[in-house]
Amino acid sequence: MDIFGKEAIVEIPAQITPEQKAWLDMMVRKGKIAVPPGGTLPEGSVISIFMRTLLWNSEEQGQTLDMVTREGLEELRSQRNLVELKVQLAQDQKTWLEKMAASSKVVPAAGDSVVSMFIRVLLTNAMDQQKALEASDPWADDDEM
């Protein structure tokens, strides 16, 4: 169950880049991905909450891996030395990801999956948005990235 005891949670493995893993760890360490008020959650749970939010937004916007440009897909296929991240998702998010993957025309590289590629796209977008926010904030810490 989720932290509020309302949703069934399942764990899925995802392959992400070492840079994405380092970014997630840094965001948790710096408090940019925060623990809910009054809570003390392990780091993995905090990252899972963040990932559930990214997936919820992408589902609401109807995003799929098929929307990525050909160049973007080639870059995703060429990524090597991926690290595994265990993500806890709501059961309906897992079902949505599986449907999105099954209907996708994208062919992943050997040892990769459409779901992992999609998660890497979401993380890349989140990293780009965070960099843009920090670049526009004159008070941001220079040593955060």
Image (spheres, rainbow, N blue to C red):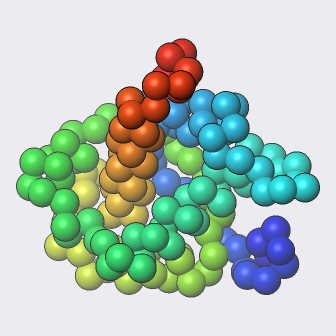
- 28, 132: nearer the viewer: 132
Relative to 35, say whether 114 is above or below.
below
Relative to 63, say whether 12 is above or below.
above
Q: Indicate the position of residue 14 as horizontal and vertical percent values.
A: 49, 54
Q: Is residue 64 left or right of residue 22?
A: left
Look at the image and tell me whether residue 116 can be seen: no
Q: Indicate the position of residue 137 as horizontal and vertical percent values.
A: 46, 32
Q: Is residue 30 left or right of residue 4?
A: left
Q: Residue at x 19, y 60 (%)?
A: 68
Q: Residue at x 42, y 79 (%)?
A: 60
Please give the count of numbered marks on the rendered protein.
0
Relative to 48, say whether 103 is above or below.
below
Q: Name the quarter where the N terminus is drawn.
A: bottom right
Look at the image and tell me whether residue 58 can be seen: yes
Q: Indicate the position of residue 112 as horizontal and vertical percent values.
A: 35, 53
Q: Residue at x 26, y 66 (%)?
A: 65
Q: Residue at x 71, y 47 (%)?
A: 34
The extreme front residue here reads: 138
Choose top left, top right, bottom left or bottom right for residue 122: bottom left
Q: Is residue 61 left or right of residue 140?
A: left
